[in-house]
């Protein structure tokens, strides 16, 4: 695995290996001294063309715990907002000696281009590109589901037989896409739920079961229900008429929460719109994995950085399969 | 040397004959012996086609000289076997008044690689609000007959109706860029399963088809002719076929790239493949080929759209739409529809020369290679094959989608009004072209 661009590129073995390494990383979080040495002397650049405090902090924290030098580059107020191209920015950072570039970009395909255009040589980690992919989010979601379900016996397992419903703005969601590919690869059964306006054209070819109403998806007794953030501008653009109507038909209300099975997880990638896609009752319930997702995010990003960067010099353990 | 004797070419790919070019016209055909002051071109094994006519070229001058100029664009045209190009109006300033179209036409005349027929804007500044000075452009020295806001759709139905009526007053035609703007806000590629997977905003086929359907009905209602630019979907073919069966005066064009390439090329996010209308599905490509073969689509036009490197070396969403296509057009047509047995060379002469000339009201192209007609000739070696590279391009920009692709055929000689613009595969120098035109003019 040279880059992490899309969960589509991950085979089952590689995905499980990342999850397993993340388990190792999570254990070190309980130690007195949390810092590990494997990326000492390596430079990880966080290149954020789009604001995302949560993802940026998660990657920064992961890289620092592995002893990497971390440079964070935000597009706002920088040369990028003055018209510098992706190519020039990337080449500048590469010239500073970046071993890995974590890139978040508002355009789909940006990470793919950095990895394949021949501009630079660093390992590229996609931290979200447009409405395309967000592989570390999907990995942390899969990790969270696996850990919740199997606890200490999680290592080496996939998600065979588990049913995950992803609810909301599938059309614009990189989280949904990344999860569909990864969860399917891991053997889970994925259900997508949204009004037709928020389902992409051709979604029937994604290998997931599609529902137009949340109640239909809940009737299938999912093991996890993942609520996606709804952005307020979607109402202006006539995807649905009002927040109230959305919450009534597609929101995880307290009433719907009560219908879930005893072990069903409630997930959300954050930040949440309480009262819109998710009720406070659901967000704060014991079923909610929202905070565990944040914690697990650091472990997953440590695992990915470790496998891509420490592995690249051949000093550490063998890496997973080719991605 | 005032004359040319082309020996042994297969005229329109059929019978072998010689062609004598004198004083800028085709003087004779038959079995001819060289005269003393004649340059003899050994054309055995070559196909003689009429000079090609492009109804849809972006020459970028004035304003976009970093991408192309009238000189560089007409050199690219000559390299592709073209002797006439219709220059789109989306320059800066926009070709929406007589002064601009006359300047563009004169530049073409001065360089002499191809006849440049300016296309006038339908609306002022391509803004879609107010009619441009269509009459002034039609009556100018440039004698504009094709009007288009290409790059933008004339989407206001009332304005489109008026444009059709008003342009008809001057024997012109509106060439519509059929794209419903509200259905294509932020659109990046064909809308389908792949756009959903790649997370690129979709450009649905219906946004093209709905405008074409509306426009053919408007054209019928007001009794004007309509030309549809770069038709790209199977559904558009159905609409045009229906309209023609109904007797509506509609003509349609397809680009070479829509005859060959599909949306699958977007997978790597290489913006070289970003074009408007977007590359479509395999089914669309096949429908377009069939429509060209059965005459539903009248012509092939390049939509040659040069862009500087930086406009393509960026993310897909940031990149400009468009591909260069003059140099490769004939090769792509050969690959897509000649080698598949759908068109023969006389059909190629129709879709790439006489039919576009008729739509543009360009004289001298009615009957291919006719005695007495201006000597506009392309001599092509169809047996040649090459891996396409930027070295095959002759314009100022390199945004070709065919890099590394095996393309058949090569233009060996191009003759524009009796003057060689391409000689043995190489462009003739500007001074030599200009001098030769003067010699022809002197007689």
Image (tube, coloured by chain):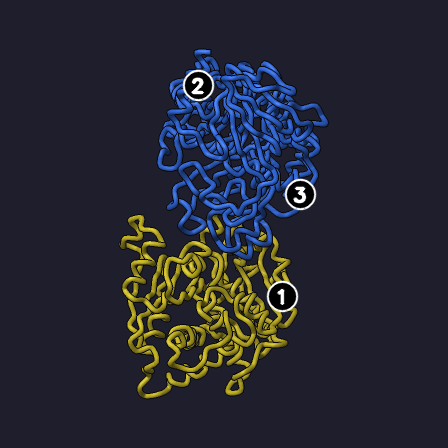
Q: Colour of chain A?
A: yellow
Counting from the top left corner in percent of width and height, residue A252 is at 54, 66
Q: CA distance from mark 1 to mark 3?
A: 40 Å
Q: Position of residue A72 (x, y in %)?
A: 30, 65
On screen, A299 above or below B379?
below
Q: Residues under labels 2 and 1: Cα distance?
A: 75 Å
| Residues indicated by labels 3 and 2 sit on the same polypeptide chain | yes
| Left/right of residue B344 with respect to residue A240 in the rendered view | right
For the residue carrying disc 3, how many other residues have a C-alpha within 10 Å: few (<14), some (14-19), or many (20+)?
A: some
Q: Are marks 1 and 3 in contact (CB under 8 Å)?
A: no
- The residue carrying pointer 1 sits among few (fewer than 14), some (14 to 19) or many (20 or more) residues within 10 Å by Cα, namely many
Label 2: chain letter = B
Circle 1 SS class: helix
Please check whether the numbered discs 2 and 1 fall on a single chain.
no
Q: What residue is disc 2 on?
A: B437
Marks 2 and 1 in Cβ contact (< 8 Å): no
Q: Is residue A123 above or below residue A212?
A: below
Residue at 61 percent across and 66 percent down: it is A191
Front position among marks 3 and 2: 2
**C-alpha distance separating marks 3 and 2:** 42 Å
Residue on which the image places disc 1: A217
Q: Is residue B363 visible?
A: no
Task: Identify which residue, B40 or B155, lies in the foreground.
Answer: B40
The chain coloured blue in the image: B
Residue B150: percent from the left, percent from the top?
49, 31
Q: Position of residue A245 (x, y in %)?
A: 54, 55
Q: Which residue is mark 3?
A: B286
Identify the residue at image location x=31%, y=53%: A80
Q: Nearer the viewer, mark 2 or mark 1?
A: 2
In which quarter of the view is residue B101 placed? top left
> N-terminal of the two: label 3 or label 2?
3
| Of the pair B95 and A62, the residue shown nearer to us | B95
């Amino acid at each position: 695995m040279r880059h992490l661009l899309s969960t589509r590129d991950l085979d089952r073995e590689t995905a499980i290996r990342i999850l397993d390494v993340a388990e190792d990383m999570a254990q070190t979080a309980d130690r007195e001294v949390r810092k590990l040495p494997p990326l000492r002397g390596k430079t990880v650049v966080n290149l954020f063309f789009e604001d995302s405090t949560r993802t940026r902090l998660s990657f920064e924290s992961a890289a620092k715990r592995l002893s990497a030098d971390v440079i964070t580059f935000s597009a706002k107020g920088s040369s990028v907002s003055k018209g510098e191209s992706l190519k020039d920015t990337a080449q500048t950072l590469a010239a500073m000696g970046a071993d890995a570039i974590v890139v978040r970009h508002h355009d789909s395909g940006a990470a793919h281009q950095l990895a394949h255009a021949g501009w630079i040589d660093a390992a590229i980690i996609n931290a979200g590109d447009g409405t395309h992919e967000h592989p570390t989010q999907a990995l942390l979601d899969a990790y969270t589901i696996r850990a919740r379900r199997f606890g200490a016996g999680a290592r080496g397992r996939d998600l065979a037989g588990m049913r995950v419903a992803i609810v909301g703005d599938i059309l614009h969601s990189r989280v949904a896409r990344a999860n569909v590919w990864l969860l399917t690869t891991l053997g889970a059964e994925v259900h997508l739920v949204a009004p037709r306006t928020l389902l992409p054209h051709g979604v029937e070819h994604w290998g997931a079961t599609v529902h137009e109403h949340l109640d239909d998806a809940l009737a299938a007794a999912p093991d996890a229900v993942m609520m996606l953030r709804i952005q307020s501008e979607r109402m202006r653009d006539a995807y649905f008429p009002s927040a109230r109507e959305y919450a009534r038909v597609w929101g995880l209300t307290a009433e719907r929460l009560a219908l879930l099975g005893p072990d069903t997880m409630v997930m959300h990638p954050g930040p949440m719109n309480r009262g819109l896609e998710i009720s406070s009752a659901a967000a704060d319930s014991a079923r909610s994995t929202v905070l565990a997702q944040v914690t697990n995010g650091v472990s997953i990003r440590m695992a990915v950085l470790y496998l891509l960067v420490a592995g690249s010099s051949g000093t550490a353990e063998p890496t997973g399969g080719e991605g | 040397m005032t004359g040319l004797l082309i020996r042994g070419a297969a005229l329109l790919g059929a019978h072998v004959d010689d062609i004598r070019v004198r004083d800028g016209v085709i003087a004779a055909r038959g079995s001819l012996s060289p005269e003393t002051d004649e340059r003899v071109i050994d054309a055995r094994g070559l196909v003689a086609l009429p000079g090609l006519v492009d109804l849809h070229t972006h020459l970028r001058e004035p304003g976009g000289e970093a991408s192309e100029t009238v000189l560089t664009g007409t050199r690219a045209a000559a390299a592709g076997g073209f002797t006439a190009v219709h220059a789109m109006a989306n320059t800066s300033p926009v070709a929406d008044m007589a002064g601009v179209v006359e300047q563009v036409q004169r530049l073409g005349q001065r360089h002499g690689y191809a006849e440049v027929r300016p296309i006038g804007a339908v609306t002022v500044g391509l803004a879609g609000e107010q009619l441009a000075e269509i009459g002034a452009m039609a009556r100018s020295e440039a004698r504009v007959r094709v009007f288009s806001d290409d790059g933008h759709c004339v989407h206001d139905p009332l304005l489109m109706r008026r444009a059709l009526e008003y342009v008809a007053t001057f024997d012109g035609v509106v060439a519509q860029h059929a794209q419903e703007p509200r259905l294509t806000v932020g659109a990046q590629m064909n809308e389908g399963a792949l756009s959903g997977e790649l997370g690129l905003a979709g450009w649905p086929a219906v946004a093209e088809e709905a405008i074409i359907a509306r426009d053919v009905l408007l054209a019928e209602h007001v009794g004007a002719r309509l030309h549809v630019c770069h038709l790209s979907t199977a559904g558009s073919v159905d609409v045009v076929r229906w309209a023609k069966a109904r007797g509506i005066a509609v003509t349609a064009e397809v680009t070479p790239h829509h005859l060959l390439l599909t949306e699958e090329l977007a997978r790597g996010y290489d913006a070289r493949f970003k074009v408007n209308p977007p590359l479509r599905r395999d089914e669309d490509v096949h429908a377009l080929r069939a429509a060209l073969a059965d005459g539903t689509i009248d012509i092939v036009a390049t939509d040659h759209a040069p862009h500087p490197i930086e406009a393509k070396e960026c993310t897909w969403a940031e990149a400009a739409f468009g591909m260069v296509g003059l140099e490769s057009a004939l090769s792509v047509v050969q690959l897509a529809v000649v080698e598949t047995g759908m068109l023969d060379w006389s059909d190629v002469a129709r879709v790439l020369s006489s039919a576009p000339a008729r739509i543009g009201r360009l004289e001298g192209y009615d009957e291919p290679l006719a005695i007495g007609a201006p000597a506009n000739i392309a001599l092509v070696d169809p047996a040649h094959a090459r891996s396409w590279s930027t070295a095959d391009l002759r314009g100022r920009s390199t945004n070709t989608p065919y890099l590394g692709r095996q393309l058949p055929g090569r233009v060996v000689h191009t003759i524009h009004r009796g003057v060689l613009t391409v000689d043995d595969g190489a462009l003739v120098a500007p001074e030599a072209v200009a001098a030769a035109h003067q010699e022809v003019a002197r007689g």
